[in-house]
Image (cartoon, rainbow, N blue to C red):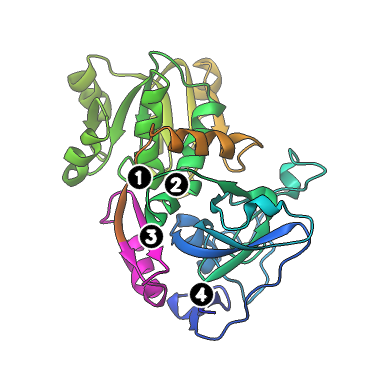
């Protein structure tokens, strides 16, 4: 089969396109999926460059590794203990790998494309419990845009209990997680306020943002002009970086901050007095809980969230795809189309 293998932590040349890579074997409780499409994520880049390689968040990486967490495809083989009803089904893959005996134990969780091979290949083998049958008129490319980005967004929303009337400031609102957040926040009866570059404002408004503010200038003044108040109930952040302190200053007393990324930088200053004297709640979000992916599939099937795909590339074009991803000029998701 065709595959792109990560040979070591490094630059783009650490990714090698292979034309004759072995098709993975299928364990008794696993299924083999013919990959139709696989989306790119920040996790792919962070893993490739070794961003997670040191510290308490270190991943157990074995090289060579086939990356790619966001897979849509069809089941072409079932292991002896996998449900035979999955054979031939179109599935969306839950990228979180759990210990079946202790599924809530985050320390026992892994990730497709990290702890085991993923979807940057014609075929991927996954535990049958990770293959969710999906009934949708959307294409494989469109469906592949959802698992990590929309799953993360849904987890962020749940962790801080976003509900009716909450005003939610969403950073990085034009990206994969951000575009999902704008849409999902509205399904909870909350009010999405987006933060993005001016060039992407019109697009983000089209997804349902009631107002848009821009990074780098006085955001409280922008909020007051846009929504008549200078504070929000929730900040949903994937950016971090130098603007973080200003973000925290936008939270009303009793506000909640939920974070699932740090694309502008992971090290930020925190005055603990701001945290406790304003009665703030902080939630770091990574591993999705059991059951959330099934909820996401249901949301997709009901049409409550729309795919946002900016560009597609063939598998052989992964270097170009990651270059485009890193430049951040796109909106939504970049997806590999394995039919190309």
> Mark 1–mark 2 contact, CB under 8 Å?
yes
Q: x%, y% of residue 51?
A: 54, 61
Q: Secondary structure at mark 4?
A: loop
Residue 323 sits inside the magenta stretch: yes
Whichever of callouts 4 and 2 sits on the residue coming sooner in the sequence is 4
Q: Earlier in the sequence, mark 3 or mark 4?
A: 4
Residue tagged 3: 335
Mark 3 to mark 1 CA distance (whole Å): 11 Å
Q: Quadrant of residue 203?
A: top left
Looking at the rendered structure, the number of numbered marks drawn on it comes to 4
Q: Which mark is residue 307?
A: 1
Q: Which residue is mark 2?
A: 146
At 38% from the left edge and 36% from the top edge, which residue is drawn? 305
Residue at the spot 25% in from the left edge and 23% down from the top edge:
223
Q: Which comes sooner in the sequence, label 3 or label 2?
A: 2
Q: Is residue 328 left or right of residue 4?
A: left
Quarter-of-image position of residue 164: top left
């Amino acid at each position: 089969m065709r595959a792109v293998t990560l040979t070591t932590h490094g630059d783009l040349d650490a990714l090698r396109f292979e034309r004759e890579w072995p098709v993975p074997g299928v364990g008794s409780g696993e299924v083999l999926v013919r990959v139709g499409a696989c989306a790119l994520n920040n996790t792919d880049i962070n893993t490739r460059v070794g961003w997670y390689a040191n510290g308490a968040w270190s991943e157990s990486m074995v090289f060579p590794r086939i990356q790619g967490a966001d897979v849509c495809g069809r089941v072409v083989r079932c292991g002896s203990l996998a449900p035979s009803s999955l054979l031939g089904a179109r599935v969306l893959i839950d990228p979180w790998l759990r210990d079946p005996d202790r599924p809530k134990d985050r320390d026992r969780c892994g990730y497709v494309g990290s702890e085991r091979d993923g979807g940057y290949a014609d075929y991927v083998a996954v535990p049958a419990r990770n293959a969710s049958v999906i009934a949708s008129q959307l294409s494989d490319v469109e469906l592949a845009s959802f698992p990590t980005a929309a799953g993360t967004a849904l987890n962020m929303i749940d962790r801080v209990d976003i509900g009716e009337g909450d005003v939610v400031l969403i950073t990085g609102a034009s990206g994969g997680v951000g575009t999902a957040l704008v849409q999902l926040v509205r399904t909870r009866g909350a009010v999405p306020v987006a933060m993005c570059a001016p060039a992407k404002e019109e697009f983000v408004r089209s997804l349902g943002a009631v107002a848009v503010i821009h990074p780098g200038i006085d955001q409280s003044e922008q909020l007051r002009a846009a929504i008549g108040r200078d504070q929000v109930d929730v900040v949903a952040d994937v950016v971090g970086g130098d603007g973080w302190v200003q973000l925290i200053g936008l939270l009303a007393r009793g506000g909640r901050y939920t974070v699932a990324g740090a694309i502008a930088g992971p090290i930020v200053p925190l005055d603990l007095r701001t945290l406790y004297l304003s009665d703030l709640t902080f939630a770091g979000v990574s591993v999705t809980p059991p059951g959330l992916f099934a909820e996401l599939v249901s949301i997709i099937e009901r049409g409550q969230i729309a795919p946002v795909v900016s560009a597609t590339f063939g598998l052989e074009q992964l270097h170009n795809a990651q270059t485009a991803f890193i430049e951040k000029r796109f909106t939504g998701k970049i997806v590999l189309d394995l039919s190309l």
